[in-house]
Every structure is written in structure tokens, then in C-alpha cells.
Image (cartoon, coloured by chain):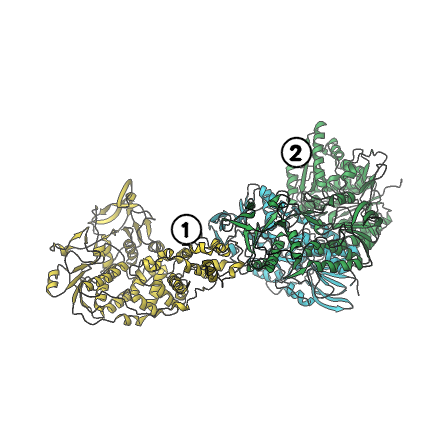
Amino acid sequence: MDNSILIIGAGVAGINCALNAAKYGTHVYLVDDTPSIGGMMARLDKTFPTNDCSICIEAPQMYEVDNHPNIDILTNTEVRKVKKADGGFSVRLIKKARFIDEEKCTGCGACLEACPVTVPDELDGKIGGVRKLISIPFPQAVPNVMVIDPDCRYGRMRDKGACVGGCVVDCSQCRECPIALCVAACRKEGKDAVRLWQANKNINIAVRSIVIATGIADAKPPRGLYGYDLYDNVVTYTQFERLMNAGGPTGGQIIRPSDRKHAHRIAWIQCAGRGLEGGVPYCSKVCCMVATKQSIITKEHDPQVDTTVYYNDLKAYGKGFWAFYEKARENGVKYVRARPYDVFEDPETKNLTVRYEDLDSGELRYDEVEILVLSTGLVANSRNERLAKILKIQLDKLGFFKEKDPISAPLETEVEGIYVCGGATGPIDISESVVQATAASLKAVSPR
Amino acid sequence: MTEEIRIGVFVCDCGSNIAGVVNVPEVVNYAKGLKNVVFVDEGKWSCSVDALSSMQESIKEHKLNRVVIASCTARTHEPLFKQTVKEAGLNPYLLEFVSIREQVSWVHMNEPEIATQKAKDLVKMGVAKAALLEEGEEIRLPVGKDCMVIGGGMAGMTAALSLANQGFKAVLVEKRPQLGGLLNLISTVSSDKELLSAEEIVRGQAKLVETHPNVVVYTNAEIENVDGYIGNYSVTIKSNGTRNNFDVSTVIVATGMRELNLEGKFFYGSDSRVVTQLELEGILKNNQLGDVKNVVMVNCVGSKNETRGCCNIGCHVSIKNALAIKRVNKEAKVYILYRDLSMVKEEHFHIDAAKAAGVKFLRFPDDRYPEVTKDNENLVINVYDILSGRAFLLSADLLVLTAGFEGDETIEKIKGHLKVSSNAEGFFQERHIKLGPLDFPADGIALCGCAKNPKTLKETIEEGMGAAMRVSIPMNNGYIEAEGIVADIDLANCNSCGLCWKRCPYGAIRVNENKEPQVVKALCKGCGLCAADCPKECISIVHYSDDQVLAQVEAALEENPADKIIAFVCHWCALGGVDMAGVSRLQYPPNARLIRVMCSARVSIKFIQRAFDLGAAGVLVAGCEFPTCHYISGNYAAEKRVNRAKKILAKKGFDPDKLWNIWCSAADGPKFANTMREMVRELHLAKEV
Amino acid sequence: MDSNTALAEKFSDVTMFRTCEQCGCCSSGCPITGVDDFNIRRIIRFVELDLIEEIANSSLPWQCTTCGRCESVCPNGIAILDIVRPLRSMTPKDFMPEEVPPCTAACPAGIDVPGYLRLIAQEKPEEACKLILEKVPFPGILGRVCMHPCESKCRRGEVNEPIAICALKRYAADKADGAFKGASKVKESTGHKIAVIGAGPAGLTAAFYLRKMGHDVTVFEARAKAGGMMRYGIPYYRLPEEVLEKEINQVLSIGIRLENEKRLGVDFTLDQLKAEGFQAIFVATGLQKSRKIDLEGTDLEDVFWGVDFLADVNVGNNVRLKNRVLVVGGGNVAVDVALSALRTGAKEVTMACLESREEMPASPWEIEQALEEGVKLMTSWGPHRIIGDNGRVSAVELVRCTSVFDEGGNFCPAFGEEKMTVNADQVILAIGQAADLSFISGQEQIRSGGGLIETDPGTMQTSVPGVFAGGDVATGPSSIIEAIATGRKAAIAIDKSLGGQGTLDETLAERVDTESYTGKRETGFADLKRVRMLTLPISERHSGFSEVNLGLGDEEALREAKRCLQCDLELRLAKEGRLAGTG
């Protein structure tokens, strides 16, 4: 049996699991299906309840992972097949083509400047974020190398009309295309790291145990919920997080998608869509504190901004969370016990009127705001199902990985040697993820 | 040691990233003329495999004993170059890294001449420091394979068992006669949809612990003394009347929590019908409920107020116990008076089940707690229900208070023994609330369970395992290793004032019987706070000594000091912000010369003073945004020191407004660039440097 | 069994509210939260806390329109209406609303609106039409031109928008060719002979119902054709001639004699009719004349009067307009005139009226249409004088109207100093209608006042026994539906005066049994939007008098009819529930 372990997912849980196991002396394959490690946390602005800058505290861990001799990072890589073998597992991974030679790319960005095609960034699209077709996932990405998203390369380029030089033919012909400016730019820099003809690569590894740390996803509201997708200035809490983030598309300016002006009245609707069609059917635990954090940061950006949080039951469950909520209130954040249903947009100003019953008084009220943030909650990663099949383990009915027994065998799955931690188990915050990741790393490295 | 200083400078083109703006050949020529420089090379891509091996050959060929690399940023590439020089037989601490991409070519793209001049300055500063560099070494401290676990509740038992299963020895110290902690006091635990007997859980786990050959259990035990640090703790305890001494390498704190004392609230203590949830657990466990008819539970008693947060588990417990009462006595009327129902994921089924069983929920406002009075010896509760907008009068023959929690009473003693800290709620304070949840600042001591904050049984068990992992790492390796950037105290000048050992955030400075401070190098993280604060200037930090930093200051200000800003930036967030500005190609004035320190706390007033003495236009101290600090609280110390420096500068006739500070995050590229623009504007600096 | 237990039992099958988390979605979405203290969330809260009786003893349950919005927005899927309904049946009788649903109550003819909407929803438009015919003989005409007061009272309007009742009536009428057959049944002859003077909506309706009650009826009409204002006052683009012809012919086909071009006071007198053996006479001559005002320049060649103009257009008299037309007036007739002007050659039509936009008496949808077709609106302007040039109109001088009504709300226009001149080639004054009462000039016995014939409100008899009057000539200008309603009322009064029972109640259509009604609504019911009727493109309108509104298709009608809240059934159910219930 090989002494290595496999960690699937390189968000904050996967990273911490990997660091613990690697420092313990175990070899780790840290696999992520996106082009960079870091997960959801790398996209956040601040973390509650201390308002630590998210990337500031995660990036050192990411570099540590990158430099640790016991850790092999495999980004853009998916788990395809898992078989029990020799007391452990034999695993087939597929490293998806990123169309870049990772060894040669230095992340210098010459290709990026040369690339003529700009597309909306997946996460930041709504709030004006754009990226080039060839891009680096985010400035602190590890590995710090470029990636070309194949979906964009074909589909969206066509949507845009034409690629460089008016080319709209099948990209298999384009791969050798001499007018691919990225390739030329890279060669000019003397690196020749862009590999338009790169293919997916199979990798076979043998490991003693597997830790699932695939994380969690933010719930996308159904079209029309509180005007989402219909009204310009209705955004989700993750989009708002990007809006606040100095590293986000607006450079940390809290501006309205509709007119790119600073917003002075902002409201959060908690439990947005919970229980409704297309919404999350349960409490996602963290949203109350996320809204509290976002409203505090908003006030820090500009104390004159009016901030209101519509909530039902406050989840201030963790250490220091209640004090954090009190701090928000002291800073002037209004908390209104209500769950609005209707939102109307003023077609001229694009302001939004929220109609709600104030539960404290039982009265119907209307508030006009300039940005409306929907706290839509967290849902299981859509890829869980496929992974569960590959690993031959079960998901619970919400789509999260099922633990064998929460008390007698927490973080264990039905298959011996496969463990789970972090958002893959359900809604969870960062520190709880780190705790679980640490505990799971112990299980993964311990003798069975 | 009087060997000849032979410095090699390697300047990277980074393709056109640097060479496209900076005139690299000119910088190379300039470097050749610098003192102690014997070799300069220009590389197209210094980080490419072939360039790295040619660098190793050059080191050998030219007998280089110092290396300066002028390229991208230390934050991403320093480890690579350190490894390279190490492989060439050079001590990696003799490498100095100069950033001319993120700090020069990317941020002054339109001014090639100015950029070239700045690059030259930065190389000169690097060379000046390199000449003074000294060898360093990773520090190793042996660590044995035994751990003391304090607290025999579920967290402690889980931790001990996890350690024992890995082959480590665990010494479990419990103050009560038997293991089990809080679980011994309660009847049931709800898990998924079933109820588990707390007694069975404890019995099962305790048996595993007590029979494990790798676990030693001390019950009825009190810790009398703990001495030492990771690798060499010596412990004295008194157990069942006898005193025991033993040595361990690591410690896990799992001392749990207790209910707040509610004496005097709602007739608690004076009326036997008023009990806490924990007491109700006991009543249920021992079948002493009797035929109560009217039960009222009040949640959040003593919690969610100015002094104390949410107890995290009260909602679950009250609902679970309300259902338990309903099971025993179906006719009993049970009311739960609450503020918020904190039930996550699918836990709302507990609420549904309670409602189905006839339990009634009334929601009272945060600022209007129910009033309890007595009417002819009957307990009458007057509660205002927000949701119906009216008050209710309830009578109770059992009033259950869901009390908040505080850390165990032993916490003060243990804090003293282990030199760790706690928060206002009487819970231990972990190293970092997000990324260090199971650690104390000092290595080798882990924390888990309700000693940290109230939590569920599942979370407690997970923390027990996690804490075990944290201490297992050094025990499994047999040593703890630290980077060579550490403090070094010259005792000759020391007057034992005590500042250093009091201020060290890691407890890495111990004081011996002669009142002399000793650095436990394995625990030192090299932040430099002690060195900057030491009134006798007798503490030096490897790789960031006073001489080395001052050499950089002097080199920077050799020419045109009146146009220059000396900027001290911390390695973590401030340099992150600088790099972010670079990656984002934010253009800002080129007046600053950056000097990297590990933490803004390293910047002593002496450095600032020297810069102004030499005629600097301004000084900037840049550290992590509050409250983030890689060294727990170094930025707070730095801020205080900057304020102090301003007073001193004013006294000495300098304009204190020329000393600036900025606390930024690693994502704050724009903030850094803006600060540069503002400084240049406010200090009326010419753009030409 | 104490009352609490009885109440609790009512809710024994309503366990759903236990999952209520009192989040406030329902009340936030409910259209009537806060109206008269209504709050659906708190109602559920009271039920949850066993305070059912308190809610039941209030009028609150009946304020609910049972639109179902609360249910559709409830995150826990609670069947809230299943909680409201039992509460309703427990509510004391005093709090129960009138038995008649608001739409029916608002209808002057008292048509069972929810009844026929339900039949349309069940895809039985013919039955629906029969139901309408129980109260009025002109469903197709009303379906096009009714002022539909029912819609403004429709409770669906409190949820989002009222049901398109009028359009659905038209749909039923257009889809139900054979429906009239059932309504054409005539009772055995009574031998009584009755004269109806005026073949407008009031006269024809009275004639129809009198005939159905077995009387021998003759209608005298001054003009060449029957229909009155329906024919001469409503442009064909609103009411096509075929529809008009069809429905008038239907009415006449049950054995009513029509004498055209017989003008009272000219061709015959009341005394002559009496002498001819008519035992009762119903005068419904309407308001056929344009109201005139004394204004400088009204004698010029290109000045027309509203009602006359419309009649000329419809009769086909060669009315050709050119270039710029100024219409004076702000009522529905003025709008009709303006739009007819556009269809008879005018290039530019401006409407000037005394009232402000909000005060304009024309229906809002009519004003909308006028604007849509390019009519320019000048509100708060009154005509000062018409300026002539060589005997032809060249311009109109307008004067600023500062207020239209006095403090008591009476029409009493006040004018300011400001004046302006509008160039125009024709002027049409549509400032009201008047009755032609010349026939009573020799009849001292028939009392009149304010230009109208005075009647006894109960018997509709004039001061002369045996002579009755109704419709606009007695009530003043009103709507067609009101004229029809008075016609029917007159028929009853006249029958009674002749010794009959005055019973007109007929059951022509099938009724729905309340048993099968569960009150369950499809999801999203509350959010269903009002169906918009297709209209003729503006580009095709001005070339002729084609009908502008194109009616509803089957699917649209079905969808729209299903939006009905069915207030009547809710009420009936509650009353039946009360009878069957708390025994």
C-alpha cells in the first residue's frame, strides 16, 4: 500500500487537510478541478467575525502548500475512477488541458495583454467583471500560471462573432493557428508556454486513503426572485462580496450595476428564497454573519451608507459572533425582523422598493434601496453526485456527503478509508472547516 | 570571520516584463560598480530551469558568498531561489531578494528612465544589505511522543484515544472522580433523528480510553505545576491524594465549560421549581419529573447580551428537553420562550416535532425579557410575544432557564501554567479564530472542545481528533523545525527589563533564574517585535538586523534623499498589496524605496529616525490591515510605535506629518497606489527622482 | 364539548400550520396586509396559539379575498386558505358580508358575474351567455361597450388587476350563437296592449321583457332604425353594425312590433295611443339632442355638435373632415367624436376640455386609446370663441379653466386670464346631451324638471297614470347598462300595474353545485396577470370603422376566467358550512 493520501478539493478545507498530513510526514496529492487552489475563500473579501482579509490569511497557506515537498498539487484535475486495491485505492485522475505548459508559464501576463477577446467573468459578470479568454484565475492564484477555458474558447468566441482575424471555424483548426496572438506573445517573451494543442492527460495514482473536501456552492436564486435577473441592482451575497473586494471587478468600490454610481442605501434579504421553488430548503447557517460582515464593511467604506438587514432568526452561533452583530448595530446597521416578498423596480432610477411586514410591529412597510443583496444560502456542490458514484458512497438527501455516524464515526463515510470534511458535509464556516479538515487528516494518516 | 565578501547579482529580464521598461543592461553595468560585487549576470528568465543551473555554476565559478536576485517578488519566488543557492552549496540566508518587477517595471511602465533609476537604487540597497548578511539555519527541537490531555470529557477522551491509536502515549488528567465531563450530567443527546443515551456514549468511550495500553488516566486530579515548552514539559499533579511527576512533549487543553451561575435571576436559587436546563437533564435522567402540569422554559438567560454571546446549543437543548417532558407527561403544557431559534440545515424538524407534540413557542423581544412574579406562591410569567403582538400570562410549576456557559473554573490556573490567554467569557483564546482554531500561539499546545466555546457533541469530537492531529505532527516527526529568522539576545547589554518576554506573542522568550531572557528559537517566529522594542537595543533578528536594515536605508538615501520615501513593508499583507498593485499594473509615483521586514512590528524608531536624519522626504510604515496579522498582533504594536515615533520626531525638530502609515490587505493594491500618490502630493515631491 | 374543543376539532385536519415559522412571507406578499388591521400571519399565529376564537369572533377572516397569494409564497407550503375557510364559517353572522358578490352588486342589471365566469372557465361559453341573458338581452353589445362598473369593484383588483369581465362577456356572446333561443320563450298572452316609445336600450329591453311576460308590445321609433344611442351614438369601430343588428333583431323576433319613423308629438300623441287601446305607455326617448351653448362663432359652417356628428357618421351621411379638428369636451362622447373624426378624414385632432386630466369624465381606457391614436389632449381649457374667416372656421380661442367644480362638487367652471388660439378647420362641440321634450309641450299633465321627465322612483310612473318613463330621458345621461337595467325594472313595474306578478326570474343556464368546489387553486394563482385583448394595429384603424378590439381567443378567455376569485362560492360555502357545521 502506498503511503500517499488523496485530497479531493483544494479550498480552505483541502489545503488545511493537506498541510496537516504533509507536515505529519505523509505524501499528499491535492487535487482540484479548477485551475487554482484556494476555493471559495480566495474569492471572499473579509471573514467574520474578525474581518480578517480572506486572501491575506489564505494566500500564505496556499504558498506553503505550493512549496511543501510532501504535497503534489494537481489543479484542473478531476477524479475519474477509484478502485479498492491493496488495502488502499487505485485512482485514475484526468488532468484537463489548460492549454498552458505549467512548467514554462511564469504568469507574466504577456499573453493576456495580447489576447483580443474579452468575456464576462463567471462570478463577476453581473457586476461588470470581465476577463480575457486566456487568464489567470485571480492574482494570488497557485499555481500562478495561465489557463484557457475551453468552453469559452469555442462557445463564447463564436457568440462574440469572431476570433482573431475573423476566424469562426472549428477551433481544432485554430489550435495551430499562427495568428493566435497569445502564442505569439508568449514566444516573443521567449517562453513558448501556450500550448493550444494540449490534450487531457490521464494520471494513475495509488493512495491509502481519500479525503473529500469538495466544498460547497453558493445558491443561485431563481430568475425573478426578488427581481433577480430582471432588475439590475439585485445581486446575490457572493456577487456583493466581489463588489466589496479590493481585488474584485470594481476595485472595492460599492457601485450599482445599473449606473456604476456609489450606492447609499443597501439592504440584505436573509433566507432569500429559502423554502420557495428554486430556493434552498434549509438554513445555511452562515448567511446571517455574512450579511453582518458585509454591512459592517460597507459602513467602513462609507459610514453614510444606509444599511438594512431583513432577517428572521439571527444565527450568531459561533465564538465572537454575537459581539460582531452588536458591533454592526453600533455602527448603525439596521436589523429589521421581516421576510419581504415583493420587490419593485423604479424603471427610471432603477431603485428597488421592498415591501415587507415588520414583524415587531405587524405593520406593512416599504423601503427604497439602491442595491438589494440576496442572502441565498449554500447548496451542495453540483459535482458531488458524480463523485459519489465514482467513490461508491452515498449523498444525503440534500446532496452533501453522508457521514457514517455523526457521533460514533464523524467524518467517515461508509467506505473505509474515505473521509469527508468541510463544505462537502453541509453548510459550514471557515473555522469549522479547518477543524474538520484537521480531524480528517488525522483519520487519513492514521493506521487502519 | 573575515572572509572576503563576494557578491553576485542576478538581474532578470522576465522576458519583456522587466526589460521592456527597465534598461536592464544599464542596471547590470551599475551593479558591477557596486562595492563587493564581483559578478553580475542578466537572465532572460532567471527562474527557468536552465537559468537556475547556470546560476549555480556561476556561484561556484566565481566563489560567490552572497547572492542578490533582482526579479519578481519574494512572496512567490524566494523559496525557489533559496533552494537553488542551497544546492550550490551556499547558505540560503546569504540570499537577498530585490523586486524590480512588481515594484518597478509594472508600476512605472511609462517612465523607463525613472524606472531604471529606481531599479538601480533597489539593487544597491540589496547589495548593501547582502554584504552584511550572515548565515542562518533552520532550528530543530526534539519532540518526544507523549502528550498530556487536560480534561476527561468527550473532547479530551477523543483526543487521548486518537493519540493512543497512533502509538503515542497520552496522559489524561481529569479533575472529577470519573471520565465523561458534561455528558455525565445529561440524559440524552440528539443526533440526526434519534436520541442517544449520554450515559452509553460515555461508558463506551471511557472504556476504550481506560483499557488502552497507551493511555494513562489520572482522575480526581489537580495540576499543581507545569514547566517548560514543547518537547520538554514537566508536570506535577496531585491525583487521588498522591503527587505525581511526569514529563510530556505536548499538551492538549480540553477543560470544557460550565453553566453560568444564575443565582438571583427569576427566583433561581430561592425557589426549587426554578431550574437550569442542565439540572433538568438530571431530573429527566433520574426520572424525577413527577406530574408537572405547566412547564415554561426561558432561553438565552445570561447570554446574547453585552458580556456574552450566543450559547450555540440552548435552542437544541430546550427543544429536546421540552419533547422529553412531553414524552413523560403528555398532558403537560410546555412553553418555550425564545429570542431567535438558531436551528440550521434540517434541524427545523425538531421544532416541527415539538409543535406537533403540543409545545408552544413564544418569541420575546431582545430588550424585554419575560417577567416572573409570584402570585400566592404560584410562579407567574408575563411574556410579550412579538409574533402575535400581545402579552401572555403563564403559570408554571417548573420554570427552566436555558443558561449561558462559561469556561471551567480551572481556567485561570491553567492559563498561568501554560502561559496562554482566555477571553472575557472565560473561554480559552485560540491562535487564530479562522485558520488556527485548535492551536494556541505557542507550538505544542492544542485546544479543543467546549473549553474554546460551547458546541455540540459532534463538533466536540471532531475538535478532539483535530487537536490530537495538531500535536501529533511534531511528535510523529520527532522534532519541531523553525525558520532561521529568529531573535538573538545579547545578554551583555540586557538589564532584564522584561519587555521582551512580556511582549512576545509566542511565549518564545523564557526568563531563567538569573532573570535573563532566553529565546526558545524553535518557538520564535522572527517577527522582530522584541528587537524593535528593546530599550537596550540588545536583540537582533537574523536576516533583519539593525545593521542590515540601516544599510538599506543609507543606500537608498545616498542620492537625492529629499525626493525619496523610505517605505517599510511587512512581508505578508503590505507586500501583498504592493504585489497586487503590480499585477494590476496600477501606475503610481516612483519615489518610494521599499524595505521588506517580516512584520511591521520590526520597524524600530531608530530606523525611522535614521531615514529622517539622512534627509528622507518621508517614511511609510505599511503593515497588515487590522485585525489581520501574521504574527497575532504585530500591527497593533507597530501602530503604537508609529505614534510614539511621531512625538519623538516632533521633539527633535522633524515634521511628524512626514511619517505615514498604512494598514492594508493583500488585495489592497489600489490602496497602496493611492497612498503613494497622496504622499507625493502632500509632501510636495517632484516626480523626478 | 366546550367551545374550545369544538374549535380545535375544526382544525384537526389542519396540522400544516405547525410548520409555520412566522417568517412574514405571507403577510409581505398579501395584497391587503394592514387594510383594516388584516394580517394573515398573525391570524395563523393566533390559531397556532389556540386563540382561534379571538380571530373567529372578528370580521378579519372575511376581509381575506382568498386569492391564495399567501399560500403561493409560503416557504413551508402551508395551505393557509384551509385555515381561513373554517375561520370564516365560524365568524358571527354580523361580520358576514352581503350575499351578493361585489361585481354583481355593482352591476346595474345584477348579472351573476362569477356565475358566468365560472361557466367560461369550465369551457361552456354558451351556458355563460345564457346566464347573462337571464338579466339582459344584449350580451354582445354590452360585451363591447359596457362601462363595466363591475370591474372597478372586482376583488381581484385588490390582488393585482380586476378580471376582464367585459371582455369575457363579449367572448361568451360571440361564442354562443344558439343561446338566445332559450331566452326567447314568451308566456301566454295576457291580452294587454303596451306601447314603448323609443327603440333605444331602455325601450327595447322593456319591450323584450314585457313581451316575454305575455303582453302585446309595439315600439314606436322616431328614426329610421331601432337601436337609439346604441346605433346612433356609438361609433362602429366600437360596436360593429352586424352585432347591433343581430341582437336588436333577436329581441324583436319574439313578437314585438316596431313602428319606425313615428315621432311622438309629430306623428302621434299619447292621447291617440290611449285611444288606440294601449293600456300602458313607456316613454324612453332618451337624450337625442346635443347640448348647445352660447358661444361666438357656433354659427360658422364648420362647426358640428357631438351627438349629431356621431349620428351622421353612423347613418352614413357624407361627413368628410379635413386637416385640423378641434373637439371641445372631455367625456366619452367627446372621445368617440375625436376618434370618429380621425376615421373620417381629419389629419390632426385636438381635444380641449375644462377638466384636468384626472377630472376628465371619460373612462381612462378611452382616453388612453385616444392618446394612442394620436389625439392631442389640452386639459383645463374652455372655448372662448370660434374665430371665422370668410364664414369658415379658422381658429378657436381658448381660455384657461382654473376650476371645474365648486366646493360642493357642482359643475361651476371658473376661468382665468390666460388665453390661447388654436388653429382649426373644423370644431366639434361635444359638451353634453339633452332630451327633446317637445312632445310634452301640449301635455301639461306630464311633469318635467331640469330637462327630464319626472317619475316615481318606485313605480316609474309619470304624473300621468298609465304613462311610464325610463332610460336617459328620466335619469339623465347614463350608461347603456343602466338604461337596460331601468328597461327591465320598468317592465316589472308595468306588469304589476296591469295586475301581473312582475316576475321575470328565469333559469336559462346550468348552475354549479357547491359540493364539488374545494377552493383549491393552482400554484401561482395569485400572480396570474390580466389578459390583454388584441387590438387592431393603429396603422389600420383610421382608414375605416373596423372594430378596434379584437376579442379574446379560447385560451385567453379560459385563462382569464380562471383568475376569478369566485367570491360568491366562498360565501355560499361558508353559509352552507355554518348550517351543516357546529351542530
Query: Considering the numbered disc 2 on the image, is that residue within a helix, a strand or a loop?
Result: loop
In the figure, C87 relative to B420: above or below? below
The quadrant where residue A88 appears: bottom right
Kind of residue indicated by mark 1: Asp
Left or right of residue C423: residue A297: right
Q: Chain of mark 1?
A: C
Q: Is residue B311 or residue B280 the one in the foreground?
A: B280
Residue A220 image offset from top left, x and y in percent: 57, 57
Q: CA distance from mark 2 to mark 1?
A: 67 Å
User: What is the letter of the yellow chain?
Assistant: C
Q: Chain of mark 2?
A: B
Residue B275 image offset from top left, x and y in percent: 63, 50
Q: Is residue B513 or residue C417 the one in the foreground?
A: B513
Left or right of residue B64: residue C104: left
Pointer 2 residue: B683
The quadrant where residue B160 appears: bottom right
Disc 2 to disc 1: CB gap under 8 Å: no
Residue B128 image offset from top left, x and y in percent: 80, 39
Task: Please tell me the colour of chain B.
Answer: green
Quarter of the image with the N terminus of chain B is: top right
> Residue B55, can we see it?
no
Task: Return the mark for residue B239.
Answer: none
Left or right of residue A317: residue B444: right
Q: Is residue A267 or residue A144 the one in the foreground?
A: A267
Query: Considering the numbered disc 1 on the image, is that residue within a helix, a strand or a loop?
Result: helix
